[in-house]
Image: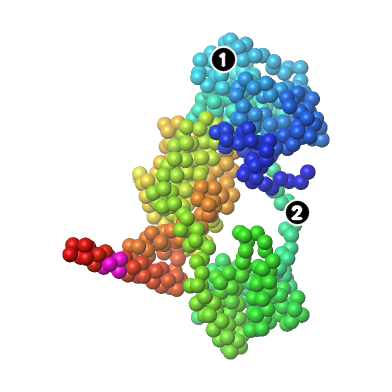
Amino acid sequence: MGYDTRDREQILAAPHFAAYREEPTMAQVGLRELRTLDRFFVFAEARGVAAPVVADFLAFVDAHRSTRRLDDLRTAFDRLLPGGAPVRETVREAIRAKRPRGRSCDRRSRDVLRDDPLMAPYRDLPAFRDVPLEDLRVLARFLSFAAARGITAPEQADYLAFSADIGSSRRLRSLKCALDRLLPGDPAVHVVLAAAIAAKTSARPARDEGKARAAAARRVGVAELPETWRNLLRDMRLGALPIHVAAPSASVVDSMEDVLREYAKVQMIADAPVEITVDGVRRLEASRAAHAAQREAPRYRDQGNRPATRHTAVMRLRQFGAALGLDAAVVADLRAHENVLRRQLGTVVPLKFAKLDNLPGLKATWETAARLLDESRRATRRQTALRLLNEAAVVALWTLLPLRLRDGRLRWGRDVRFEGDRYRVDIETAKEEEPLRGALHSVLRPFLDALVLRGLNPAWLDEMRRRSMQEESPLFQHVNGRMLSRGYPSTVWRTHFGTGAHISRSRVHTELGQLGPEGVETALALGAQRDPRTTNHYHGEAVAAAQRRKGQDMVDALLDEVFVL
């Protein structure tokens, strides 16, 4: 079976999820576990299995050596079904049968473990009954290990010695699961034991290691561009241009290169010279229009052929042609066509502004961030708590500080510092390396404090903040401490608001633009914009909005006069 690329909604639409679809705990089932559960339901339906036994689970994973799929089913059943459901114990028996333990396997029951003298500090804790039995057995084993060696405050080396006889970190992760339930917020668990797990865990190779990215179907490779084009692109990246010529930003050069590669492909297909000409631009636009017409999915309709995209492509070709020393008449023709396309921009609503109209207001957005933060504090599973915390902080931070995704991989101490009683940001943005520095608003402090603590007791805030700054830890981390992907902020915004995090910059301009020129300047500074055309555009929008408000006020005054008379 190939890799399942369906999202949650598509998987849950299957009839066999009808009984579970509306369960509140369904949201706690991860996507990987959900996919495995879907495969098992299909497997069980094909075999007519209504109440699975151990043999059914073993048959389900017969082609696999590991117990990973059974582990996924165990996790899914634990979150969906009540504690007494027989299938929860059945899948555990299947896991034990798939990977038999040694003769020293601990078979003690929960009641027997409760009576163990070493369990005295834990047996009366409210969460004792909630700890999975396998994890509780590992805890009992560790307590015996520590007592035999006189260990009272375990260090990383002690945890590693406890798991020295096995190659994986599974035993330490099971121990951490138990202590997470019994001692939530204990630094010994979330710092020392987590470090031991990281040291024990083998480094995983990158997913795309050894797999070359598929060649672009509608672009040539960079090596296929004319040599003069390649040399000019290289000089632009290095800034090796005449002193009177401003070097374009890296993002502009990337955009030029993409357009040139597509342009060259179109000319080669037409068996025309790879040169920037008016006829060549016509071929490029015709090719884009034909390709867009073939798209059937509504969300991709007109992709690559919208007015803004056409305008950008011609602008990049004109800019590159001028730098290349193209004939002045050709450059003038391209500029004239570019101006025509720019006027067409006003005939359609740009996609980002259409999405902006559907975006909740600032108050509703902030309420979403506050709700997610509150839910993270009440979540019982650490993985869920950290997910909600990351989402809350992303929504809050991008609402007040609209960063680009390339600038969003922030680290403590390097990009965000704590001075006095305020957090400060110091970022050199990807937008022409414009710096973004200053104190962050105090309303962000609860979110940033929570990111520092990562579920620990607030009493450890100063220590964890010092440690994070010293180690330059990522602001947004997975439960294992690794930095989340660059696209994570957009994933969060798309989940909660239906569009990527880039929309936050448009909203900042919209909201602050209502305050007039000063608001526009503030928005441009937040977005690290310095292009005078961008400034003029948003100043114009602010003036137009002010005139509309003034006109509406005049109409309101006239209506008031009429009704008074």
Picture residue at 65% right of the left edge, 68% below the top: 292
Name the quarter where the C terminus is drawn: bottom left
Q: Position of residue 302 (x, y in %)?
A: 61, 66
The part of the image, by quadrant, that contains residue 313 is bottom right
Q: Where is residue 251 in the image (x, y as percent from the top left)?
A: 56, 66
Write down the residue under mark 2: 211
* Residue lying furthest right: 63
Label 2: element kind: loop
Q: In this view, does 98 lie above or below 112?
A: below
Q: What residue type is labelled 2?
A: Lys
Q: Is residue 333 above or below residue 446?
A: below
Write down the residue under mark 1: 119
Picture residue at 53% right of the left edge, 54% below the top: 499
Q: What stretch is highlighted in magenta?
A: 550-555
Question: Which mark is on residue 330?
Answer: none
Label 1, residues with CA under 10 Å away: few <14, some 14-19, many ≥20 = some
| Left-right relation of 340 to 449 | right
